[in-house]
Amino acid sequence: MPTLRTRVAVFACLVLTCSAAFAQGDPAAEPALTPEQQKKVESMQALLQSLDPRTGKISLGDNLATLDVPKDFYFLDAEDAERVLTEAWGNPPGGQSIGMLFPAGQTPFDEGAWAVTIEYNEDGHVSDSDAADIDYGDLLKDMRADIRATNPERTKAGYPPIDLLGWAEPPHYDAATRKLYWAKELRFGDEPDTTLNYEIRALGRKGILSMTFVAGTDQLEQINGKRESVLTMAEFTPGNRYEDFDSNVDKVAAYGIGALIAGKVAAKAGLLAGGLLLLKKFGVIAVVALAAVGRKVKSMFSSSSTPS
């Protein structure tokens, strides 16, 4: 049986071949589709063409935070993000994403596509007093056990089980900026290639802004190169910053830094399984959709044409 990496490579070659044939107006190049397949193609075309990529200053939530998106990225709002995660990448519905970031010039269907999902969890003000005392080896063991405990439910729902293999990047907390990052290497089911979930957390007055890279583990060097850019994009607005905390009126979270890393991992990993599920859902039918949409859709996601 071919590996996922092989299927991705074949998929990419077919996209290029079909795109060229469509561009040359070769009617014979279009495969014959069943009504069900044609419906899927039309759905994918509609999804791609409906996405609204944006750059520049973007307000998150109810003026909760701002995201300063440079030209080498683009932002998709909450509605677009939910559609990409569920319709395109095959994740369970009902996520809490308030947006996604993609590299400029890349669509959610591209070979090697990676993204950053953005969420906000208003669980209360998170104390960072335990940050210097965490044993990350012990924490990793607890996280593995928690994830394995959720696998029977995932399997029953038709999703592959998850195995947490280890830290791809050990946790690091910057007390000056109140930002935390770490990376996990995950395996979904029997896939030979592993998935990278690279987590960033920004602590605020009443909750946490979560930004998660979803990529292949072999893209770790590339993601590390983009980490600082993503870290500096998001800032809480005045009144919502960590230092604006008022103990007389604000709720305090029931967990600290250690539990923040461990307690959210199972839900997050489950939500973001889609990075490696794209071809499982759409198969080579995606080739026709991408070829038919052609340059118009691809240009929407380039740095030169993304609207600000």
Image: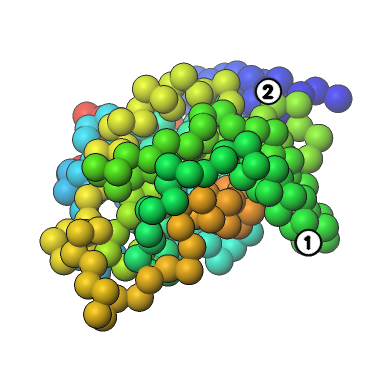
Q: SS class of the residue under badge 2?
A: helix
Residue in view at x 48 percent, y 63 percent:
255
In the picture of the structure, the residue carrying the numbered disc 1 is 153
Q: Quadrant of residue 194?
A: top right
Front residue (pair 56, 120): 120
Q: Can residue 249 be seen in this snapshot? A: yes
Relative image position of residue 57 (x, y in whole percent): 17, 48
What amino acid is labelled 2 in the image?
Arg
In the picture of the structure, the residue carrying the numbered disc 2 is 5
Front residue (pair 201, 75): 201
Relative image position of residue 261 (x, y in whole percent): 52, 49
Which circle, 2 or 1, is nearer the viewer? Answer: 1
Residue in view at x 30 percent, y 43 percent:
175
Query: Few, some or many C-alpha atoms within 10 Å of disc 1 (few <14, some 14-19, many ≥20)?
Result: few
Q: Quadrant of residue 137?
A: top right
Residue in view at x 51 percent, y 32 percent:
170
| Residue projecting furthest to the left | 238
Q: Quadrant of residue 245?
A: bottom left
Mark earlier in primary sequence (2, 1):
2
What amino acid is labelled 1 in the image?
Glu
Relative image position of residue 216 (x, y in whole percent): 58, 29
Q: Can residue 14 be seen in this snapshot? A: no
Residue in view at x 82 percent, y 58 percent:
152
Is residue 299 toward the left or the right of residue 224 in the image?
A: left
